[in-house]
C-alpha cells in the first residue's frame, strides 16, 4: 500500500483529495530563480492559500529552496505564516485594513502602502512600538488598481518626510498585460513610468532597497521589468499556458496540483434515459455510469458539465449530465475492467497509469476562466495531500 493510500485510510474520510507535488513546486521555483539570478531576488507569491495549494506547506518547502521573500494578499495570511514559524520577510500585497497597522508591526509584516492615511496609522503604530517599520510603496503605472498614480507621485513623495518611523524599503508596481503582445505598448509605458518613479524617489533622497514589478508574465516575457526582485505566482504552481506570453511557451514548468476521487457507485443505464439535473444528458446506448463524490462545492465547476473528461484506468471518460454540488457522473462504458472504488483523476496527471494529463488550463478554457481560478477554487473540504 502506498504512503498516500495509507494516509487516506487512516483518516477515514471521503476519498476526494488534491495531491500537491512539492518537488514540482521546488523545481518550478528553482527554474525561476536560475532564470533571474543574479540580477534579481525572488518573492514567492503565496497569497490565497498559495493559489489553493496550501500556503504554509508551500512556504516551508520554498524556504528550503531559498525563497527570499513571500508575498501574501492580506495581513491575515502573513500572520498564518508567522504562526507556522516562517520567518522570511513577508510583503502584504494588498496593504492592510483599518485597525491592522499594529498587527503588521507585531508580526513583522511589510505592508504595501498607497495612501497617506495608511502611512500615518502605520507610522503611529511603529512609533508606539518604538521602531522604524519598512514599507513598500506601490505606484500605479497603468493597471488602474492599487497604487499612487504615476503622474501624482511628486506630491505623495513630498509628504513622506513627516513619517519618521517608516522606511521606504521598496518601490513597486504591477503589470497589467505583460502576457499579451497586443498590449506591448502599455507594458513598455508601465516599465518607463516605473523607472521615472524610481527617479522621483531618488531625487527626494530615498534609496529603496527593492524595486519590483514583474509577475509571472513579466519574468518570462520582459527581462527589462525584473528590477532587483521578481514576484512569481502562477508559474510557481506550474500554471502558465494561459499566463505567459505566447513567445515563451516552451517553459519546463510542472503542474503542482492534481485532483482525485474514487468511484462510489456503478450502474447500467438503458438507452433513452436521462441522467442528472435538468435532463442535459440522454444515454444513446446502454451506458455504465459511475458516481464520483466530488461536485462544484469542491471546485469541480458546474460549467464543466457534459464537457470535461476525467482519467480512469488510463482512459479518458466523459463527464455526463450536470455536475452537482457534491456529486459528478461519468460515463465509463468504454473503460474495461472498471470497478467500484476505482481512482479517478479530474485534474492533473495520472501517476499510476498512462501518463495522461488534464491541465488546469484546459479546465479553465472549457469553463471560460483562468487556470488560477481552477486551483484557487478547489474547496476547503478537499484535503490537500503533500507528496
Ligand atoms: C498575484 C500577484 C503577483 C503574482 O502574479 P502571477 O501572475 O501569479 O505571477 C505579483 N504581484 C502582485 C502585486 C500580485 O497581486
Image (cartoon, helix red, strand yellow):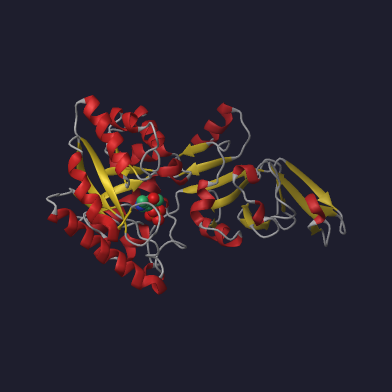
Whether residue 66 sits left or right of residue 204 in the image: it is: right
Rendered position, 50 above or below 85? below
Rendered position, 308 above or below 266? below
Residue at image position (51%, 58%) is 370
Whether residue 17 sits left or right of residue 42 in the image: it is: right
The answer to whether residue 67 of the structure is visible from this angle is: no
Q: Which quarter of the rendered picture does the N terminus lie within?
A: top right
Residue at image position (82%, 50%) is 268
Q: Position of residue 82 (x, y in %)?
A: 34, 30
Q: What is the quadrant of residue 262 in the picture? A: top right
Whether residue 42 sits left or right of residue 300 in the image: it is: left
Rendered position, 36 above or below 327? below
Q: Position of residue 45 (x, y in %)?
A: 36, 47
Between residue 387 and residue 152, name the one nearer to us.
152
Rendered position, 52 above or below 248? above
Q: Where is residue 177 in the image (x, y as percent from the top left)?
A: 40, 64
Q: Which quarter of the rendered picture does the C terminus lie within?
A: top left
Q: Position of residue 88 (x, y in %)?
A: 27, 37
Between residue 73 and residue 66, name the one nearer to us.
73
Between residue 217 and residue 348, name the one nearer to us.
217
Amino acid at each position: 500500500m502506498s504512503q498516500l493510500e495509507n494516509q487516506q485510510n487512516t483518516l477515514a474520510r471521503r476519498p476526494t483529495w488534491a495531491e500537491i507535488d512539492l518537488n514540482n513546486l521546488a523545481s518550478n521555483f528553482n527554474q525561476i530563480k536560475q532564470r533571474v539570478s543574479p540580477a534579481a531576488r525572488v518573492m514567492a507569491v503565496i497569497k490565497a492559500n498559495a493559489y489553493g495549494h496550501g500556503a504554509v506547506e508551500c512556504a516551508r518547502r520554498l524556504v528550503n529552496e531559498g525563497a527570499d521573500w513571500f508575498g501574501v494578499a492580506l495581513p491575515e495570511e502573513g500572520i498564518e505564516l508567522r504562526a507556522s514559524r516562517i520567518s522570511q520577510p513577508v510583503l502584504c500585497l494588498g496593504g492592510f485594513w483599518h485597525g491592522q497597522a499594529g498587527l503588521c508591526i507585531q508580526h513583522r509584516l511589510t505592508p504595501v502602502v498607497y495612501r497617506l492615511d495608511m502611512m500615518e496609522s502605520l507610522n503611529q503604530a511603529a512609533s508606539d512600538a518604538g521602531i522604524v517599520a519598512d514599507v513598500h510603496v506601490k505606484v500605479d503605472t497603468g493597471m488602474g488598481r492599487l497604487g499612487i498614480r504615476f503622474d501624482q507621485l511628486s506630491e505623495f513623495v513630498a509628504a513622506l518626510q513627516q513619517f519618521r518611523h517608516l522606511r521606504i524599503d521598496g518601490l513597486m508596481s504591477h503589470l497589467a498585460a505583460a502576457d499579451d503582445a497586443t498590449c506591448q505598448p502599455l507594458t513598455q509605458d508601465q516599465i518607463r513610468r516605473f523607472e521615472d518613479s524610481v527617479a522621483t524617489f531618488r531625487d527626494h533622497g530615498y534609496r529603496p532597497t527593492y524595486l519590483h514589478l514583474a509577475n509571472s508574465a513579466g519574468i518570462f516575457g520582459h527581462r527589462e521589468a525584473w528590477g532587483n526582485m521578481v514576484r512569481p505566482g502562477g508559474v510557481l504552481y506550474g500554471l502558465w499556458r494561459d499566463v505567459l506570453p505566447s513567445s515563451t511557451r516552451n517553459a519546463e514548468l510542472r503542474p503542482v496540483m492534481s485532483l482525485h476521487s474514487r468511484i462510489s457507485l456503478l450502474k447500467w443505464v438503458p438507452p433513452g434515459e436521462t441522467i442528472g439535473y435538468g435532463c442535459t444528458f440522454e444515454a444513446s446506448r446502454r451506458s455504465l455510469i459511475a458516481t464520483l463524490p466530488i461536485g462544484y462545492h469542491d471546485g469541480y465547476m458546474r460549467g464543466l458539465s457534459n464537457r470535461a473528461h476525467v482519467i480512469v484506468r488510463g482512459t479518458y471518460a466523459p463527464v455526463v449530465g450536470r455536475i452537482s454540488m457534491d456529486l459528478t457522473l461519468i460515463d465509463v462504458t468504454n473503460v474495461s475492467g472498471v470497478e467500484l472504488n476505482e481512482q479517478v483523476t479530474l485534474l492533473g496527471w495520472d501517476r499510476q497509469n498512462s501518463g495522461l494529463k488534464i491541465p488546469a488550463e484546459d479546465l479553465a478554457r472549457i469553463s471560460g476562466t483562468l487556470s488560477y481560478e481552477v486551483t484557487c477554487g478547489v474547496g476547503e473540504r478537499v484535503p490537500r495531500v503533500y507528496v
